[in-house]
Image (tube, rainbow, N blue to C red):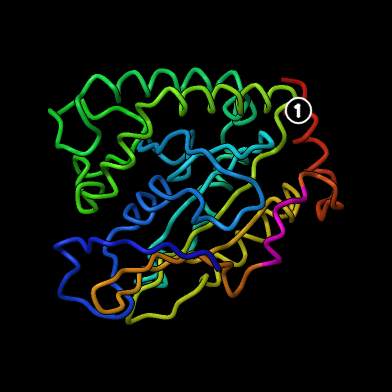
Amino acid sequence: MQTREVVSIPEIHKSQNGTLSIWHEEESIVWLWAFPDLFPWPYRVKCLFTLVDGNKRWPGDLWGLDNEGNLLIIEAKNRRTQLKSDPFVDFEDLLMSHDSCVEEITSENLRQKWERLLKKELIFPNGYDQRPKGKTGGILPRSNQRKHIRIWEDIAKRIDERIRSDDYKFTVDRLLKKRKSRNNPVPHFIGLLVRDKKKGFGLNEKGLQTKQRLCNTVKKTNVHLYETYAERKGKKLVLCIKPGTRSSSPSPGCCGNSSSTSGGSWENFAARLSAH
């Protein structure tokens, strides 16, 4: 389990004690933008972008790259209701319904998307103030006029400073080149369940079935489940992420060495991807 202590508790959460009730899962994505080392992964991770343009072509709430050039696509779901506890369904739609899904996850396509969104992001003086209607494009979480990143004002400033640095641009450029040199390995599809203080839900039955079908399309070692929560301890707030209780082993250091659980789907998918 990875943890991170936050000094400032957002005003909206100050009345709560213990595990916070997080009303929108995008708040957890803000945590990862601020503290990518919070994610329990064997390699360092750099965030690329958060997308809100639909879940067919660009599913996932956060796209990032690790130091080995692996693409991580994270979909967060709030565990407040069992109905919503299926973070994997959007990934299945990408792989099964979108014919050009392979093209979307190549280093060239990722670079074009990242550069275009970063340019839009940096036009404005910061990444957390509300922006004019129709001008909300950028790489940071921006649902509801960037409401959820503004909730976490102190760490939002930390995020904004980082994405405007030369180091951020240099590192992303290096990781995209690394991904290209490895022939665009198949992404890691990650479900992130946001724990609620009053509910203990994990994956619902549909989610378990979707996860299994996804494992049958890509390698089981490329499908992961984690849970996250924020816990108040007196005047301190601790952010936590740990492997989901109904997950397969999270050992993500396997970048393609384990055997496939599918009847050929993995080999076809990997071949299409390396061809790009």
Residue 15 image offset from top left, x and y in percent: 15, 75
Q: Residue at x 51, y 49 (%)?
A: 74
Name the residue beneath numbered marker 1: 182
Magenta-drawn stretch contains 271: no
Q: Residue at x 83, y 51 (%)?
A: 260
When the figure is inspected, residue 65 is found, relative to residue 40, above or below; the finding is above
Segment tinted magenta in the rendering: 248-254
Q: Please tell me how many numbered marks the rendered image carries.
A: 1
Q: Residue at x 76, y 28 (%)?
A: 182
Is 188 on the left or on the right of 151, as rendered?
right
57 vs 20, nearest the viewer: 20
Quarter in which the C terminus is drawn:
top right
* Crowd rating for badge 1 (residues with CA inside 10 Å; few <14, some 14–19, many 20+): some
Amino acid type assigned to the residue bearing label 1 in the image: Arg
141 vs 35, nearest the viewer: 35
Describe the element under mark 1 as helix, strand or loop: loop
Q: Main secondary structure of the magenta part?
A: loop
The picture quadrant where one finds residue 94 is top right
Quarter in which the N terminus is drawn:
bottom right
The picture quadrant where one finds residue 70 is top right
Residue 96 image offset from top left, x and y in percent: 62, 41
Q: Residue at x 42, y 62 (%)?
A: 4
116 vs 242, nearest the viewer: 242
